[in-house]
Image (cartoon, grey):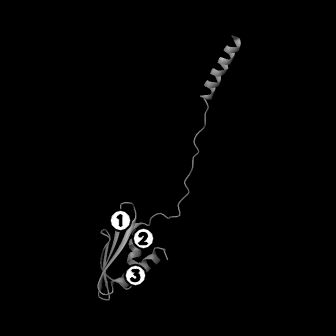
Amino acid sequence: MKKKTLSLLLLIGFVLASGCYYYGPAPYYVAAPGPYAPYASYDSIWDSATRAAQDVGIQITSTNRNAGMIFGQRDGTDVTIQVIRQSDGRTRVELTAKGNQGSGVANDFYRAYDAYMGRR
């Protein structure tokens, strides 16, 4: 009887002790910073677009910074540059050229714009 009682008490003790094991906190990992820089501000993008337009010979006829519109001409080609704020925090720049040399103006503008933004 003593042997059975002792075995039963040992079994109950092991069962109770095994249910109380503490594993500790989960490991905490910090994400490494990504290779991307934060988005450029609207003001720096606006200034870069304006300077790039002037560098490639676009004569700016009017601007509206709040609406993000730049209007101008180069060699008889009407040029509209839009600086658009997006909902995710990024800013997009679009150029629309109406005339016979539209693609040349666009290529020149984007090349100069990328240089001002530090991309080339």
Corner quadrant of residue 95: bottom left
Q: Residue placed at 29% from the left, 88% from the top?
A: 76
Secondary structure at badge 2 equals helix
Quadrant placement of the N terminus: top right
Q: Residue placed at 68% from the left, 18% from the top?
A: 7
Identify residue for label 1: 85
Q: Residue placed at 34% from the left, 68% from the top?
A: 84
The kind of residue tagged 3 is: Asn
Question: Does the CB distance between marks 1 and 3 fall below 8 Å?
Answer: no
Task: Pinpoint residue 78: horizontal percent, then vertical percent.
Answer: 29, 83
Among the two numbered marks 1 and 3 on one chain, the one whose residue lies closer to the N terminus: 1
Q: Residues within 10 Å of mark 3 (few under 14, many from 20)?
A: few
Task: Pinpoint residue 92: horizontal percent, then vertical percent.
Answer: 37, 69
Q: Is residue 74 above or below residue 49?
A: below
Q: Is residue 32 left or right of residue 7?
A: left
Among the two numbered marks 2 and 3 on one chain, the one whose residue lies closer to the N terminus: 2
Q: Residue placed at 35% from the left, 65% from the top?
A: 85
Q: In the current view of this chain or complex, which residue is farthest to the top? A: 1
Give the mark toward the camera: 1 or 3. Answer: 3
Secondary structure at badge 3 equals helix
The kind of residue tagged 1 is: Arg
Q: Is residue 16 above or below residue 86?
A: above
Give the mark toward the camera: 2 or 3. Answer: 3
The kind of residue tagged 2 is: Ser
Q: Is residue 14 left or right of residue 79?
A: right
Name the one closer to the observer, 101 or 20.
Answer: 20
Question: Does the CB distance between marks 1 and 2 fall below 8 Å?
Answer: no
Q: How far apart are the alpha carbons under marks 2 and 3?
A: 21 Å
Corner quadrant of residue 48: bottom left
The dot on residue 44 is 2
The dot on residue 107 is 3
